[in-house]
Image (cartoon, rainbow, N blue to C red):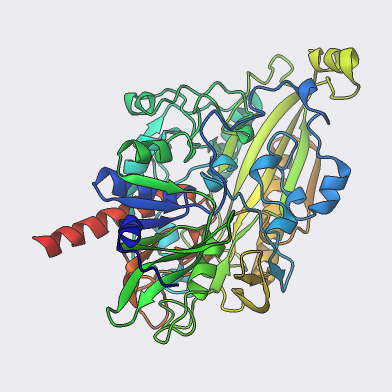
Amino acid sequence: MAFLNIDSVKERTFDAIVIGSGMSGSWAAKELGEKGLKTLVLERGRDVKHIKDYPTTNLYPWEFPHHGVIPEDVQKANPIVNRCYAFGEDAAHFFVKDAEHPYVQEKPFDWIRGYQVGGKSLLWARQTQRWSDFDFEGPARDGFAVDWPIRYKDIAPWYSHVEKFAGISGNRDGLPHLPDGEFLPAFPLNAVESYFSKHVKTKYSRDVISARCAHLSKPNPIHLQQGRAQCQERTLCQRGCPFGGYFSANSSTMPWALKTGNVTLRPFSVVESIIYNEKLGKATGVRVIDTNTKEAIDYHADVIFLNAAALNSNLVLLNSTSNRFPNGLGNDSGTLGKYVAFHNYSAHISAEVEGFEEWATDGRNPAGGGYIPRFRNLHKQETNFLRGYGAGLSAYRGRTSSGEGIGDELKQNLAKKDLGPWRVGSHMMGETIPKESNYVALDKSKKDPWGIPQLKISVDYDDNDAKMKADYLAQLTEMFTSAGFKNIKGESDHRAPGLDIHEMGGVRMGNDPKTSMLDKWHRLHACQNVYVTDGASMTSTSYQNPSLTYMAFAARAVDHYVGEKKKLNS
């Protein structure tokens, strides 16, 4: 669209534009703002202010109209998001509803999204593990996907950088495949979890550690400067934490970015495309659709950081076409939208534990309990599947109270103090292999409410996933049995991909522009003033939670851009 008002164009011109305000976008905004760049942050959803916009955070169970349960008509109207474990009456306002943002499922895919300032950082499970060279060297070692253009030494300083600011709790466990970080004190394992940890270490030489998580177990001055306080262990995190006890973009990076005075936040702005100037041979801006007015508006900048979350970053690039890039911005390799992968959470196991009656579950553990790092195919190929899996582990002794009844009856049930037997559970966290056949593309006929082509998703499990799942169930069953647990039940829930909320890839990194989209600094090979540092950039998925890695990637990429900019100006 033509804009003839020169002052208007000037008002819409910035040093940098960040697309997305979530886990990685907020980090890009913070780093750019701190380094003095006038930065525009575009967010497609509404603004969510820390504390002010957490409407359920202090409600008691009996204050919810439906006791925390989503009404049946709402569940039926939202079959996809309703499958998410955190979609309850207390947090439903942070989730995208199915009909509001349609997409095409060429194969079943549960796309769970949070469109608001802060994105899914208001919804995540806060698990934070560093990746190691066992992960970054995996594709080269096993021969699937392409080699990562970086190694652990390249990202390690940036892990430290973001850990110190975000606040990560954990123990220094000394595991080469799970590097230690800049930790605050860990949340300890309870009696049964500790027993199981000692048992598998002794019998199997395997590890069960305290889960590492983005909670302030003991705030440092930098956290207090952010206005955050120690985690209160309420375990109501999905409602938004008024204490800032866990890391979210809303409580930490976005307020910090805005405080620099260099960052402008524009919510209600769906990015339609990145503008490419063929004469200049670079991107010059971003076209957005205002979700309230449906007006198309162009914004301009020297550099674009694309952090719209993995699949939406794919969509933006696919929809950014020109004579130079008819198949999507930077897509000389033809790999854009391909090699999408995810995590396999489709198996879990439970059991009962006798004894330990002298112990109660001591308070609430916001880290969720224990974590079993990968123990398969680490130093050699020992199974009939590639790569490996980790697992969550938690033991608990529930109270006999219930949420039945209304009014005084409900209050009395909730107030009961009797303890039931110990139970233990685990869920699988498996790595899936990026394949060309797992892809996303633009649908040729269907458009969303803003006139943008809908994303078509074609992603599925494969035989490697099935073999890995069978091994997880067999190994955990054996470990539970040898530990003396009873009534062991291993189950597969046959969920569709996507429900893990760890979709990755499509804009992968690599050394060779013929087989990848991004270089080692997260720049598009073919359009080097566009950086992608969210899940779209992942070459492989590892088995570990990826959010901490996205944060480190974003901070490292901004540092690289600013360094290159200074060189040109010197």
The answer to whether 471 appears left or right of 408 in the picture is left
Residue 144 visible in image: no
The answer to whether 229 appears left or right of 470 in the picture is left
Going by the picture, which residue comes out furthest to the front?
5
The N terminus: image quadrant = bottom left
In percent of the image, x 33 and y 82: which residue is there?
A: 278
Q: How many marks?
A: 0
The answer to whether 425 appears left or right of 510 in the picture is right
Q: Quadrant of residue 451?
A: bottom right
**Residue 8 versus residue 464: which sits nearer the camera?**
8
In percent of the image, x 47 and y 45: which residue is there?
A: 129
The C terminus: image quadrant = bottom left
**Residue 173 versus residue 204: which sits nearer the camera?**
173
Q: Quadrant of residue 303?
A: bottom left
Going by the picture, which residue comes out furthest to the left?
570
Residue 9: x, y in percent?
34, 62
In percent of the image, x 83 and y 19: which residue is there?
A: 401
Q: Quadrant of residue 357?
A: top right
The answer to whether 562 appears left or right of 145 in the picture is left
Residue 109 visible in image: yes
In percent of the image, x 91 and y 22: which residue is there?
A: 405
Residue 228: x, y in percent?
44, 26
Residue 345: x, y in percent?
67, 53
**Residue 78 versus residue 169: which sits nearer the camera?**
78
Q: Eyeballing the image, is 272 above or below 396?
A: below
Q: Eyeballing the image, is 181 above or below 568?
A: above
